[in-house]
Image: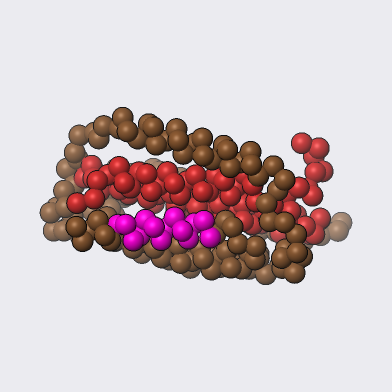
Chain colours: A red, B brown
Amino acid sequence: MVPLNWYILLSAVVFTIGVFGFLSRRNIIIMFMSIELMLNAVNISLISFSHYLQDMRGQILAFFVIAVAASEAAIGLAIVIALFRNKATAHVDEIHEMHG
Amino acid sequence: MISQLFFAYFAFAIVLLSVLVITRKNPVHSVLWMLLLFFHIASLYLFLNAEFMAAIQIIVYAGGILVLFLFVVLLMNIREELRINKFIGAWPTGFTFAVGLLVVITMSVRSFVAGPQGKYTIDLIKKESNIKVLGKLLYTDFLFPFEVASLILLVAIVGAIVLAKKRVKS
């Protein structure tokens, strides 16, 4: 039997890799993929909790996380397409219209 | 023993593939490694007795979201992508932040105490099947969140069309 802590640690490592990718990649599409990576890490921990605590609510929450991830990908990629139309770049360091 | 070996393989493969996803220069390669990563995560779900979530993972992520990513990746200039540096200048800051986060999570996991066990034991789920149990809960106790999720998807459809369509000159 695999202990629950191993799953949580795996989820933490994948989440951290996602955070690193989001903070340091130049390409905006890879940044979106890092967000998907983080959501997947959360799903791993939710489903392992659901299995080890013998409660289905973890799987239901993971179900909603997948629904939100799908809509987030659709909206995010639509924003990227609108960005391409106006700016023709996918690099976050060249996008500084808002002087942030 | 065999289950621990199984888990070790999947954990190693998932970590390796996620590192590959965020470090490839060519975004198409990243998307393809991510496809393999999603299949591994789906098999981890099978390992946790969540068959429906494994199927949804493959259908929604591999079949829907990754195809969307691939479409958008094909819009951009891969040759320029291969030429320039893949990380931004301040990447050590991001690395430090990520390592700090990992240390904090690892420290907090050590004092983790599992809550009381629920009533959905493995025998019950085996008797009723995973999909039946999940569907019953989803359409009774969680009906309102389910409807909210459908509203979110509707907003996403409308929003994506509005954002991505060409502006009509008036």
User: Where B6 falls versus A95 (above or below)?
Assistant: below
Q: Quadrant of residue B111?
A: top left
Q: In terms of depth relative to the viewer, which is nearer, A26 or B65?
A: A26
User: Where B74 falls versus B107 (above or below)?
Assistant: below
Which residue is drawn at the image coordinates 54% and 40% (left, top)? B98
Q: In terms of depth relative to the viewer, which is nearer, B104 or B143?
A: B104
Q: In terms of depth relative to the viewer, which is nearer, B24 or B155?
A: B24
Quadrant (top left, top right, bottom left, bottom right) of the C terminus of chain B? bottom right
Judged left or right of residue A50, residue B166 is right
**Secondary structure predominantly adopted by residues drawn in magenta:** helix
User: Where A42 falls versus B2 (above or below)?
Assistant: above
Q: Quadrant of residue B77?
A: bottom right
Q: Quadrant of residue A81?
A: bottom right
Residue B54 visible (yes or no): no
Quadrant (top left, top right, bottom left, bottom right) of the N terminus of chain B? bottom left
Which residue is drawn at the image coordinates 61% and 41% (left, top)? B94
Judged left or right of residue A41, residue A92 is right
Residue A10 image position (x, y, % from top left):
38, 48
Q: Tell me where the magenta segment starts and ends, as one range.
A: B7-20
Residue B134 image position (x, y, % from top left):
28, 53
Residue B56 image position (x, y, % from top left):
39, 61
